[in-house]
Image (cartoon, rainbow, N blue to C red):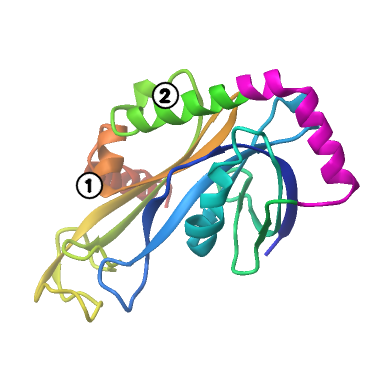
């Protein structure tokens, strides 16, 4: 796992939200609190932003203090962030991550001086980030045409799963079978196509990673999971 330390001016703190992480011990997964924070520094003349996904106690605790610091364009530091290139460059907190709301040292002082000298620019950048966040959240479950103004890097994952609990199966589509998950409530399951759509929305303010599951993915793409699965199967069969 690649690790990075970051020092930057905080521009935006997302309201707390909850995602569901897969957990075989708990039906439906476990709830994980998360926020995104957006930061900037003097790199690229201050035109690029960095998005960091903050999870668990840091999202519920330290980030609450961080909200009041956004207006003043405060400098903060984060250590031991996980670097991912799975769907473009992204950073997220780990169990070892520490968030310093009042970092010291020469680099922090230089960055604080830069933020004081560029308040108007940072205000414009923050407004652009806020507009992008609001517009993306409103458009997320419409159609792909809503994203035409943005560059979209996408990835679609298809698999066959239980029609009740969505656990992966190895039976042909439409086949009746017994689900391999002990906590599944169905006595007899049917193997159905499942789809996950993961993509990065990118504009001048930065990028935002989105993952849509099952029906939501179908709504955005305008195609049912089963139809797309059968199309992929036909192409794969011809190449075999």
What stretch of residues is rendered in magenta?
103-124
Q: Is residue 217 visible?
A: yes
Examine the image and state in which quarter residue 163 appears. Answer: bottom left
Q: Is residue 205 above or below residue 58?
A: above
Q: Residue furthest right?
A: 106
Callout 2: few (<14), some (14-19), or many (20+) C-alpha neighbours within 10 Å?
Answer: some
Residue at 37 percent of width and 66 percent of height = 22
Q: Is residue 155 left or right of residue 46?
A: left
Q: Secondary structure at mark 2?
A: helix
Report whether 124 appears left or right of 213.
Answer: right
Q: Main secondary structure of the magenta part?
A: helix
Give the labeled residue for mark 1: 226
Q: Position of residue 86 (x, y in %)?
A: 57, 51
Badge 2 is on which residue? 147
Percent x, y of residue 121: 69, 20
**x and y percentages locating residue 50 in the rendered image:** 65, 39
Give the Cα separation between the discs numbered 1 and 2.
24 Å
The answer to which of 68 and 196 lies nearer the viewer is 68
**Image point 41% across, 28% down: which residue?**
134
Q: Residues within 10 Å of mark 1 (few under 14, many from 20)?
A: some
Residue 219: image quadrant is top left
Q: Which mark identifies residue 47?
A: none
**Magenta segment includes 151:** no
Instruction: Return the residue found at the far left.
Output: 187
The tag earlier along the polypeptide, 1 or 2, is: 2
User: Regarding mark 1 in the picture, which secondary structure is present there?
Assistant: helix
Marker count (numbered): 2
Residue nearest the observer in this picture, 58 or 109: 109
Which residue corresponds to the image point at 31% horizontal and 41% vertical from the top-left?
217
| Residue 155 seen in the current view | no
């Amino acid at each position: 796992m690649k690790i990075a330390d970051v020092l930057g001016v905080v521009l935006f703190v997302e309201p707390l939200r909850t995602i569901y992480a897969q957990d075989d011990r708990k039906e439906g997964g476990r709830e994980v609190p998360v926020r995104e924070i957006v930061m900037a520094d003097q790199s690229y003349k201050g035109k690029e932003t960095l998005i960091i996904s903050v999870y668990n106690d840091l999202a519920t605790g330290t980030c609450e203090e961080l909200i009041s610091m956004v207006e003043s364009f405060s400098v903060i530091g984060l250590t031991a962030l996980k670097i991912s290139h799975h769907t473009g460059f992204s950073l997220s907190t780990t169990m070892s991550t520490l968030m310093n709301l009042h970092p010291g040292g020469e680099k922090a002082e230089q960055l604080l001086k830069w933020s004081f000298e560029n308040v108007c620019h940072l205000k414009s950048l923050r407004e652009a980030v806020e507009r992008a966040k609001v517009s993306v959240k409103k458009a997320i479950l419409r159609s792909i045409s809503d994203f035409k103004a943005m560059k979209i890097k996408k990835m679609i994952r298809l698999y066959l799963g239980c029609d009740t609990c969505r656990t992966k199966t190895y039976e042909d589509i439409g086949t009746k079978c017994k689900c391999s998950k002990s906590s599944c409530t169905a006595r007899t399951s049917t193997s159905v196509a499942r789809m996950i759509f993961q993509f990065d929305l990118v504009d001048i303010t930065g990028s935002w990673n989105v993952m849509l599951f099952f029906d939501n993915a179908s709504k955005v793409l305008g195609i049912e999971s089963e139809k797309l699965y059968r199309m992929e199967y036909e192409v794969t069969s011809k190449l075999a």
